[in-house]
């Protein structure tokens, strides 16, 4: 019984230590979510405005530009995958990687080669474990994205997009990331960056709505050339911010669940410890009573 009690006490102490760690990580994530949400809220309007500007140029001009015109035959597609650097965030990274695998399978079914650009240690570890290659990878700062990193990623994918597929370039670019919906829900999202195909926030025009007139200076081609890197940078940076906010929310949720599980373990082991202690006390009392009875019987015989 004594050995069993020691085991229960060790498990209770271990669960209490784990609870302190998970509770601290939960509070840290909760404190960072607000800042991450503010950064997302500040970045999203600009990203949408740039997307609408590019859409306006594409809609109100008849020029064939790589930004808006899909090639007749797409040979190679790039997939940019955004994961986290650290774990303890539930299924945050695995959901993105699963979505990226499904997208890759779909692209291969369409006869396209797929190349990968990885952001975050989890994606890099996933590919290294399976001995798969990636064109380029970025590690560090996924929980606090910097625009310089987004610019590096944008420069890399734009350079690949501007290179013909026959020379190692790509014909289209997709990105896969976790979009922050709420503190509870984070949704993996797949977006095709290039060629541009969807106008975000498009609504049916009102009957009396007056459409704007567009003029492009110096010409449409140069406007699109100038907007291309700005568009890619803004979309990638917004995806990084969305992913960071989703990561903090997922980690807070996972650590809250871990803390609750630690509480349950402490209660269960405490109950088992009390039960074992009670059994030990009962056994000791029985031994004492039995010994006293034996002494009484010996005295009576004498």
Image (cartoon, rainbow, N blue to C red):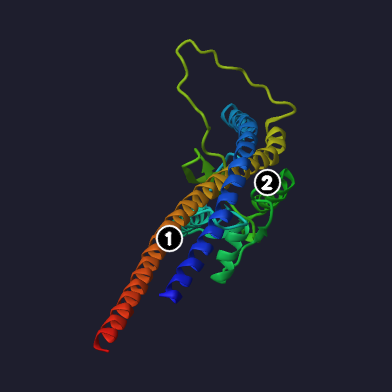
Mark 1 — residue? Answer: 270
Residue at position x 60%, y 32% from top? 48
Dot 1, crowdedness within 10 Å: few (<14), some or many (≥20)?
A: some
Q: Is residue 273 above or below residue 251?
A: below
Residue at position x 51%, y 58% from top? 112
Residue at position x 56%, y 29% from top? 59
C-alpha distance separating marks 1 and 2: 44 Å
> In front: 273, or 167?
273
Mark 2 — residue? Answer: 145
Question: Which of the two marks, 1 or 2, is nearer to us in this view?
Answer: 1
**x and y percentages locating residue 47 in the rendered image:** 63, 34
The answer to the question of whether label 1 and label 2 lie on touching residues, with beta carbons closer than 8 A, is no
- Specify whether residue 194 is in view: no
Of callouts 1 and 2, the N-terminal one: 2
Q: Residue furthest top?
A: 208
Q: Is residue 237 left or right of residue 271?
A: right
Q: Is residue 161 above or below residue 231?
A: below
> In front: 164, or 53?
53
**x and y percentages locating residue 120 in the rendered image:** 62, 56
Quadrant into which the N terminus falls: bottom left
Which of the labelled discs sits on residue 130, or is there none? none
> In front: 142, or 77?
142
In terms of secondary structure, where does tag 2 sit? Answer: loop
């Amino acid at each position: 019984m004594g050995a069993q009690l020691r085991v229960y006490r060790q498990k209770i102490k271990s669960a209490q230590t784990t609870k302190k760690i998970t509770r601290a990580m939960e509070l840290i994530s909760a404190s960072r979510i607000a800042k991450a949400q503010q950064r997302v809220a500040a970045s999203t309007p600009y990203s949408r405005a740039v997307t609408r500007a590019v859409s306006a140029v594409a809609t109100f001009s008849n020029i064939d530009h790589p930004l808006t015109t899909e090639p007749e035959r797409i040979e190679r597609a790039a997939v940019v995958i955004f994961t986290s650097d650290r774990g303890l965030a539930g299924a945050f990274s695995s959901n993105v990687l699963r979505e990226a695998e499904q997208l890759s399978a779909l692209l291969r079914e369409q006869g396209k080669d797929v190349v990968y650009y990885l952001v975050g240690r989890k994606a890099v570890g996933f590919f290294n474990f399976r001995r798969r290659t990636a064109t380029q990878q970025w590690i560090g700062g996924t929980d606090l994205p910097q625009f310089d990193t987004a610019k590096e990623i944008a420069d890399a994918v734009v350079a690949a997009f501007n290179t013909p597929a026959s020379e190692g370039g790509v014909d289209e670019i997709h990105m896969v990331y976790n979009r922050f919906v709420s503190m509870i829900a984070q949704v993996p999202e797949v977006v095709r960056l290039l060629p541009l195909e969807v106008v975000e926030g498009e609504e049916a025009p009102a009957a009396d709505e007056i459409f704007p007139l567009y003029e492009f200076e110096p010409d449409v081609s140069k406007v699109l050339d100038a907007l291309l890197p700005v568009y890619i940078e803004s979309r990638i940076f917004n995806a990084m911010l969305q992913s960071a906010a989703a990561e903090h929310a997922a980690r807070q949720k996972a650590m809250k669940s871990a803390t609750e599980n630690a509480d349950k373990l402490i209660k269960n082991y405490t109950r088992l410890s009390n039960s074992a202690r009670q059994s030990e006390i009962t056994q000791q009392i029985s031994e004492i009573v039995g010994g006293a009875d034996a002494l009484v019987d010996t005295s009576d015989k004498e």
